[in-house]
């Protein structure tokens, strides 16, 4: 019955051949799209720049993607073939009433099971590699998720910073994840997979950058209204540059140097003499606004009375590439926009609109930008 | 055999309710007929499906371009949370329950569900629960924490609004409805099958309904507990999930996903069952490997409880636990994937009639293959580390739940529509619906695999330019509009079919094999005039395939047994008043219509409101009235039994 020539005839018509060709082209286009691309998109998982991301990429592409492509074409092909080949026409006799074929069914159970067993074995191998803790010299970074920004502590280096994590190239990093409020997930796709930051727990993962560069990261566990703008940057730099960064982070910014904690920063004598008189007074005024305003209830600037830990640490905020958890690039104009009304930039975030006057905003921007 | 079900008819007592029985609405409000309840389930779930679909279009519109300000971030979070909650609990699940409600008793030759009033109660509680959840939009804000509602984001310190309260109370109501419904299905299928219908002759849709019901019975207690603990945290100040008070947020995830993963199978198995009914009918040959499909569904039922932590690979469970749950997840891929070969095997060598139900069934298979493959990558923990919580997962779940479940359910609706309403849906509109839905669906969700691989996280209300997300988000949004149009075509089709003059639909228009096609379209209130006797897996196909029929040596008397209801019975139509139908030779005990299940369901919703409201006056008013409704209805319900 399967070989009935009368029924096969109309199926080889030009129209259905065109249709099959169309489908095949479409499917090939999808495959090319997925298989052929390495992109420079900032969060791409297909552009690994560290060993962890590399291992995952190899597992995905070699052991999952290509077998999946084969299975996809084979099974969809079978389905399409059955659909076109066995199309009935009015008056067709009843087809053979087959109920099954045990041997065939056992085969098509065992073959997928075998394929999956192989993939599972390779999965275990990759898992073991990823779970190996760093050996030799490594740096520990404590990552603490906050609604909606990142805090980075380097316990061995005495550095605390926010939203911009620095690491030396080629050195393994032990990341210890936790959270100050709800669950977040730390993810820098160029370097490694993600790991959740859960309050009350410490999760560990290791990552390493093989190339210098500025890598994007983003919270990937839904954490509330500004989940979308809980972004970060990871700066991987040669050891020398990293050491310089650490030295700078540990220093107290020149403007605030010499100010005794608790003293009014405006009255300081330690202002950099190089700064012009006008901007100097603006910076001084900004420091006053900061110290006497609402800022200090949430933020910390080392060397001043501001020691609160609710919002991001701002000691060297002027040297950072971005503000508001990489929502805006760090330019005076953007900082002005942010300070005028943070709720307009990032609605629902925990920094209220302080209704600052334009003069105060300008002074604060000058001050914060001076904190290099 | 008729003697087995002939039950003396209780004398009707005159009651005040009697007067209202003429009213058309009353016949629906007070019905305990599984067919009417099934239709109400389907209608309500379609209405909620439209709401959920509208929410999906809002989400897609917000994401059409980078940094779009169409929706405020918090509203976006409410909308995507309610989209998922609506589609899962108010759309897909109850639509399967509705189809099952209508079809299963007919398939097994029963007159009704085992507990008709409990059945009505399940429906009304689901319906009120759905309205309760949606009222949150106008009563202080909808849930905004995602359908998984991870603690501690749902806890009061981080979420002081009423959104999570609506969510947890609403789900609690829906959970009661689901468990009651599942018990009903289990007893119906285990105890009320027609004589001769052994388990290996059970239609596959009935098989999967049975398995799904067991899944509900075992999975829902877990979320019930989780919801109660969360309720205590929010309303009574405990800290089960708050680390600051010694609680553990991961406990929520374990309890939730122990329910949440079986829930996926609760949504997909009925669609698999529908496809397993539709394919043989339109291929004009039996299902290929009946027992493989039945047993692999049972296997899925068991294995479904061993994979929950694959939703938690990045929570730091450790390599060993991840490996164990990866193994379970790979394992469950086998019985799930094998079905695809069985379905293709059913098409193979058939004489395919491409009516709309078969189109949707084939669409189901084509989409489900993709959903299955993407599921394998997610089951591998290292790959999951990159893919989880990205749009790759969004693509995967929609290939399973839309490309799978929804396509399967539409196949079922087109297939059983003439049985339910005695009218066909228009074939041309049906085909337009299918093709638009197929193209729109793949246009919407296929690009999301790529978006996820390129790093777009889930549940973000916006994204930035120059992340490589613009083009495919635009395509996905345009695809979703196409999907919206395709669903509208179905709605138009349904309305047109209702407006067309009544057709005479034959008992078995599709030349199908199962018992529901042996009675009239639509069937009389008591379903069958005589209890059918079953001699094979395909009672209506025995002339086709004598050697394939199980127990074929037995005399084939079922054609006589399944005689058609007398004309006068069909004419009386609703026929719920009395148990005795049209003076036919066999008496059927059909329960009286009753309003008490509706009142009880309503009382429970009032109690949910009482828990929700803070002002003591409101709280006490609602609590007391809810309790009064409850007590009165339970008393009335129990009294009726002794009638």
Image (spheres, grey):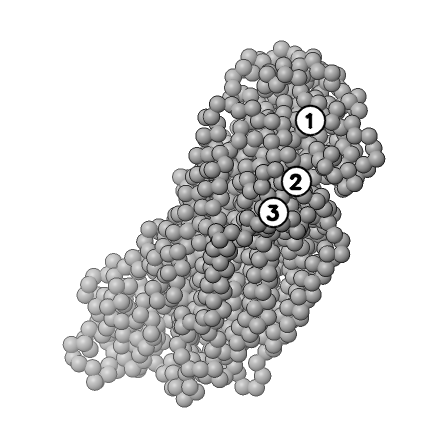
Q: Is residue A283 above or below residue B425?
A: below
Number of other residues with Cα within 10 Å of mark 1, as a class: few under 14, some 14 to 19, many 20 or more? many
Label ID, residue B259: none
Q: Is residue A28 above or below residue B296?
A: below
Label ID, residue B111: 1
Which of these two is toward me, B410 or A26? A26
- Point out the residue furthest to the right here: B553
Q: Report whether mark 2 lies on the same chain as mark 1.
A: no
Q: Are marks 2 and 1 in contact (CB under 8 Å)?
A: no
Q: Which residue is mark 3?
A: A7
Residue A240: x and y in percent read 41, 89
The chain holding disc 1 is B
Label ID, residue A93: 2
CA gap, disc 3 and disc 1: 43 Å
Residue under the point 45% across and 46% down: B436
Q: Nearer the viewer, mark 2 or mark 1?
A: 2
Number of other residues with Cα within 10 Å of mark 3, as a class: few under 14, some 14 to 19, many 20 or more? some
Q: Is residue A335 above or below residue B46?
A: below
The chain holding disc 2 is A
Residue B39: x and y in percent read 56, 31
Number of other residues with Cα within 10 Å of mark 2, as a class: few under 14, some 14 to 19, many 20 or more? few
State whether residue A282 appears in this view: yes
Residue under the point 76% across and 28% down: B558
């Amino acid at each position: 019955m399967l070989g009935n020539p009368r029924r096969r005839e109309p199926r080889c018509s030009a129209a259905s051949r065109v249709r099959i060709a169309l489908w095949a082209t479409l499917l090939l286009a999808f495959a090319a799209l997925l298989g052929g691309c390495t992109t420079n998109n900032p969060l791409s998982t297909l552009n690994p720049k560290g060993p962890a991301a590399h291992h995952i990429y190899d597992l995905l592409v070699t052991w999952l993607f290509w077998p999946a492509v084969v299975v996809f074409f084979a099974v969809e092909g079978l389905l399409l073939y059955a659909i076109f080949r066995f199309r009935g026409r009015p008056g067709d006799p009843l087809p053979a009433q087959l109920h099954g074929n045990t041997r065939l069914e056992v085969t098509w159970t065992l073959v997928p099971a075998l394929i999956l067993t192989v993939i599972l074995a390779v999965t275990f191998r990759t898992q073991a590699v990823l779970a190996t803790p760093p050996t030799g010299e490594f740096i520990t970074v404590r990552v603490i998720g906050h609604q909606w920004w990142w805090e980075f502590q380097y316990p061995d280096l005495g550095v605390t910073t926010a939203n911009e994590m620095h690491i030396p190239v080629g050195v393994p990093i032990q990341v210890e994840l936790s959270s100050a409020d709800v669950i977040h997930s730390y993810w820098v796709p160029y370097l490694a997979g993600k790991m959740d930051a859960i309050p009350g727990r410490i999760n560990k993962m290791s990552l390493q950058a093989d190339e210098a560069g500025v890598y994007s990261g983003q919270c990937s566990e839904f954490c509330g209204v500004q989940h979308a703008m809980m972004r970060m940057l990871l700066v991987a730099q040669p050891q020398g540059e990293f050491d310089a960064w650490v030295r700078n982070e540990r220093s107290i910014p020149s403007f605030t140097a010499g100010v005794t904690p608790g003293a009014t920063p405006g009255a300081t004598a330690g202002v950099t003499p190089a700064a012009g008189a006008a901007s100097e007074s603006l910076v001084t005024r900004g420091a006053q606004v900061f110290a006497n305003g609402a800022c200090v209830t949430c933020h910390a600037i080392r060397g001043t009375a501001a020691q609160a830990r609710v919002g991001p640490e701002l000691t060297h905020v002027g040297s950072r590439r971005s503000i508001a958890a990489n929502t805006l690039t760090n330019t005076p104009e953007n900082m002005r926009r942010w300070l005028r009304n943070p709720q307009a930039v990032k609605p629902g975030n925990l920094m209220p609109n302080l209704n600052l006057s334009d003069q105060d905003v300008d002074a604060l921007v000058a001050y914060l930008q001076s904190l290099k | 055999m008729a003697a087995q079900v002939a039950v003396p008819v209780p004398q009707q007592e005159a009651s005040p309710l009697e007067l209202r029985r003429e009213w058309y609405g009353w016949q629906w409000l007070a019905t305990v007929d599984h067919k009417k309840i099934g239709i109400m389930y389907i209608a309500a779930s379609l209405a909620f499906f439209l709401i959920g679909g509208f929410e999906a279009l809002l989400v897609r519109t917000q994401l059409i371009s980078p940094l779009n300000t169409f929706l405020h971030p918090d509203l976006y979070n409410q909308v995507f949370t309610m989209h998922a909650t609506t589609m899962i609990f108010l759309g897909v699940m109850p639509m399967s329950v509705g189809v099952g409600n209508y079809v299963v008793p007919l398939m097994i030759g029963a007159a009704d569900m085992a507990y008709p009033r409990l059945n009505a109660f399940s429906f009304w509680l689901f319906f009120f629960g759905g309205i309760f959840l949606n009222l949150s939009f106008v009563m202080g804000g909808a849930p905004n924490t995602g359908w998984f509602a991870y603690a501690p984001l749902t806890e009061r310190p981080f979420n002081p609004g009423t959104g999570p309260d609506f969510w947890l109370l609403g789900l609690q109501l829906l959970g009661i409805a689901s468990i009651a419904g599942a018990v009903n299905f289990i007893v119906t299928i285990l105890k009320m099958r027609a004589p001769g219908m052994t388990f290996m002759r059970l239609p596959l849709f009935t098989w999967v309904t049975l398995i799904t019901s067991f899944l509900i019975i075992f999975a829902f207690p877990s979320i019930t507990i989780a919801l109660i603990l969360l309720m205590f945290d929010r309303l009574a100040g405990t800290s089960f999930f708050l680390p600051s008070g010694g609680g553990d947020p991961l406990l929520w995830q374990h309890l939730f996903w122990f329910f949440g993963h079986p829930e996926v199978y609760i949504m997909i198995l009925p669609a698999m069952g529908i496809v397993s009914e539709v394919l043989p009918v339109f291929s004009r040959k039996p299902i290929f490997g009946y027992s493989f499909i039945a047993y692999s569904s049972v296997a899925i039922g068991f294995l479904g409880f061993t994979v929950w932590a694959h939703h938690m690979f990045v929570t730091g469970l450790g390599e060993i636990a991840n490996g164990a749950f990866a193994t379970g997840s790979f394992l469950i891929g086998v019985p799930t994937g094998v079905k695809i070969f069985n379905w293709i095997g059913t098409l193979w060598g058939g004489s395919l009639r491409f009516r709309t139900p078969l189109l949707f069934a084939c669409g189901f298979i084509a989409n489900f293959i993709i959903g299955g493959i993407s599921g394998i990558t997610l089951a591998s923990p290292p790959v999951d580390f990159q893919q989880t919580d990205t749009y790759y997962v969004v693509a995967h779940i929609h290939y399973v739940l839309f490309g799978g479940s929804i396509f399967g359910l539409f196949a079922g609706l087109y297939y059983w529509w003439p049985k339910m309403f005695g009218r066909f849906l228009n074939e041309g509109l049906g085909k337009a619906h299918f093709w638009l839905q197929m193209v729109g669906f793949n246009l919407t969700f296929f690009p999301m695999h790529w978006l996820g691989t390129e790093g777009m996280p889930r549940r973000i209300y916006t994204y930035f330019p120059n992340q490589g997300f613009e083009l495919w988000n635009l395509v996905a949004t345009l695809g979703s509009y196409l999907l919206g149009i395709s669903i509208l075509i179905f709605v138009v089709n349904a309305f047109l079919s209702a407006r067309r003059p009544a057709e005479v639909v034959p008992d078995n228009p599709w030349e199908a094999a199962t018992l529901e096609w042996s009675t009239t379209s639509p069937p009389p209130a008591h379903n069958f005039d005589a209890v059918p006797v079953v001699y094979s897996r395909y009672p209506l196909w025995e002339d086709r395939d004598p050697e394939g029929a199980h127990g074929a040596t037995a005399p084939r008397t079922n054609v006589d047994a399944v005689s058609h209801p007398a004309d006068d019975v069909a004419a009386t139509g609703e026929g719920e008043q009395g148990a005795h139908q049209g003076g036919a030779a066999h008496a059927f005990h059909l329960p009286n219509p009753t309003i008490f299940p509706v009142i009880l369901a309503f009382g429970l919703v009032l109690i949910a409101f009482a828990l929700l409201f803070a002002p003591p006056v409101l709280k006490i008013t609602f609590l007391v009235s809810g309790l009064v409704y409850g007590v009165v209805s339970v008393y009335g319900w129990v009294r009726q039994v002794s009638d």
